[in-house]
Image (cartoon, rainbow, N blue to C red):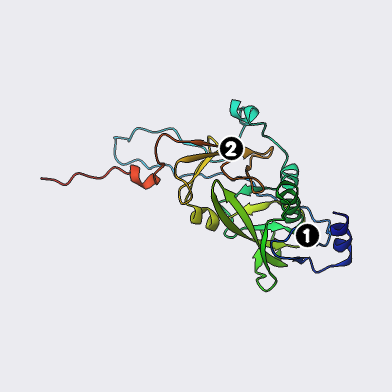
C-alpha cells in the first residue's frame, strides 16, 4: 500500500496499471480535492383533470414522487447493519446500484479500495484487464465534462459462476463505483426498491440478493464479495414483471 501511495504522488495521469490478474497489481491516481456530487430526488407533478359538464369524475388521491418528511426507519435496516456513510462504503469495496447511470463508472480512489479489499480477501486484486485506450467522456449534472483515465475490467463472483464488470475510471473526486443500467440489464436485474432486494435473473433466478442501504439512501452491493453471499433462496423462479400483465380474453 505504501508503494501505491508513492506511485499516486509521482504520476498525474491517473492510470491504473499492473500485471493483469496478478497478485501485485497496482493502482495509481492523482489526488484532487474535488467533492463528488450526488443527485437529489425531484418531484413529479401531474395535471388536474378538467370538468366536463355537470357530472364530475370522482377524484383520486395524488401520489408523491419526491422526498418530503424523513422516511421512518424500517427494521431490516438495523438487522442488516446498514445506513453506512457512502464514503465508508467506498472504502469497503461496495458500489451503488444506480439505474440512472448509462455506463458503470467510478473514481480511481474507489477502484483502489476495491482492489485492496480483493487483495486482502483473495490475494488477488481482481483486475482482469486495463484498457488505456477506452477513455470515454462523461457529462455531469453541474455542466462539467470529464474524460476517464482508462477502463478497468474487474472480476466478479456469484456462487459458482464467475463474471466480469467493466468500469470506467474517472480521475477526479472520490465518488463510489456506480453499477449502471447497462450492467443491470445484462444481469437481468429485477430490483425491489421498497424492500432493498434484487434478483439477477440472467445469473440465478432463484436467489434473492439483500442490498444494503447507505446513510444517504443509496442501495449498495459489495463487489469484493460473492454477490450471493447474503442472498436467500426463493420458493420459485422469479419471472419478469411483464409476465404478470393481464391478457385480454378474446371475444367469442
Q: Nearer the observer, disc 1 or disc 2?
A: 1
Please give the name of the residue rendered at 67% of the width and 48% of the height, measured from the top-left corner: 224
Could you say which is closer to the camera, residue 8 or residue 100? 8
- Residue 64 in sight from this viewpoint: yes
Q: Is residue 6 left or right of residue 84?
A: right
N-terminal label among 1 and 2? 1
Q: Residue furthest bottom?
A: 133
Could you say which is closer to the camera, residue 94 or residue 141? 94
Q: Is residue 151 above or below residue 60?
A: below
Q: Is residue 63 left or right of residue 138?
A: left
Which quadrant does the N terminus fall into? bottom right
Q: Is residue 108 above or below residue 201?
A: below
**Residue 80, horizontal then vertical, whole percent:** 63, 31
Which quadrant does the C terminus fall into? top left
Q: Is residue 233 above or below residue 185?
A: above
**Residue 49, horizontal then vertical, whole percent:** 39, 42
**Residue 56, horizontal then vertical, whole percent:** 32, 35
Q: Looking at the rendering, which quadrant does residue 102 occupy?
A: bottom right
Please give the name of the residue rendered at 72% of the width and 54% of the height, measured from the top-left corner: 124
Which residue does the numbered mark 1 point to in the structure image? 24
Q: Residue furthest left?
A: 252
Please give the name of the residue rendered at 72% of the width and 46% of the height, measured from the top-left corner: 121
- Residue 147 in sight from this viewpoint: no
Q: Secondary structure at mark 2?
A: loop
Q: Looking at the rendering, which quadrant does residue 215 occupy?
A: top right
Could you say which is closer to the camera, residue 8 or residue 37? 8
Instruction: Give residue 230's mark.
Output: 2
Q: Looking at the rendering, which quadrant does residue 103 occupy?
A: bottom right
Could you say which is closer to the camera, residue 85 or residue 221? 221
Q: Secondary structure at mark 1?
A: loop
Amino acid at each position: 500500500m505504501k508503494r501505491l501511495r508513492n506511485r499516486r504522488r509521482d504520476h498525474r495521469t491517473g492510470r491504473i496499471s499492473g500485471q493483469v490478474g496478478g497478485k501485485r497489481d497496482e493502482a495509481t491516481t492523482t489526488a484532487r480535492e474535488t467533492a463528488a456530487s450526488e443527485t437529489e430526488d425531484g418531484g413529479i407533478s401531474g395535471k388536474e383533470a378538467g370538468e366536463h359538464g355537470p357530472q364530475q369524475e370522482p377524484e383520486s388521491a395524488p401520489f408523491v414522487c419526491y422526498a418530503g418528511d424523513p422516511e421512518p426507519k424500517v427494521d431490516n435496516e438495523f438487522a442488516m447493519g446498514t445506513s453506512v456513510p457512502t464514503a465508508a462504503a467506498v472504502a469497503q469495496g461496495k458500489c451503488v446500484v444506480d439505474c440512472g447511470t448509462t455506463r458503470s463508472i467510478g473514481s480511481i480512489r474507489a477502484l483502489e479500495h476495491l482492489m485492496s479489499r480483493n487483495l486482502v480477501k483473495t490475494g488477488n486484486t481482481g483486475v482482469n484487464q486495463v484498457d488505456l485506450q477506452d477513455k470515454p467522456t462523461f457529462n455531469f449534472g453541474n455542466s462539467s465534462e470529464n474524460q476517464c483515465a482508462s477502463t478497468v475490467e474487474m472480476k466478479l463472483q456469484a456462487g459458482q459462476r464467475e463474471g466480469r464488470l467493466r468500469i470506467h475510471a474517472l480521475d477526479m473526486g472520490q465518488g463510489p463505483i456506480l453499477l449502471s443500467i447497462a450492467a443491470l440489464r445484462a444481469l437481468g436485474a429485477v430490483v425491489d426498491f421498497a424492500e432493498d432486494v434484487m434478483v439477477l435473473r440472467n445469473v440465478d433466478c432463484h436467489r434473492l440478493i439483500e442490498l444494503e442501504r447507505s446513510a444517504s439512501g443509496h442501495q449498495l452491493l459489495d463487489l469484493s464479495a460473492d454477490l450471493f453471499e447474503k442472498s436467500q433462496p426463493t420458493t420459485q423462479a422469479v419471472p419478469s414483471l411483464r409476465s404478470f400483465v393481464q391478457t385480454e380474453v378474446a371475444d367469442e
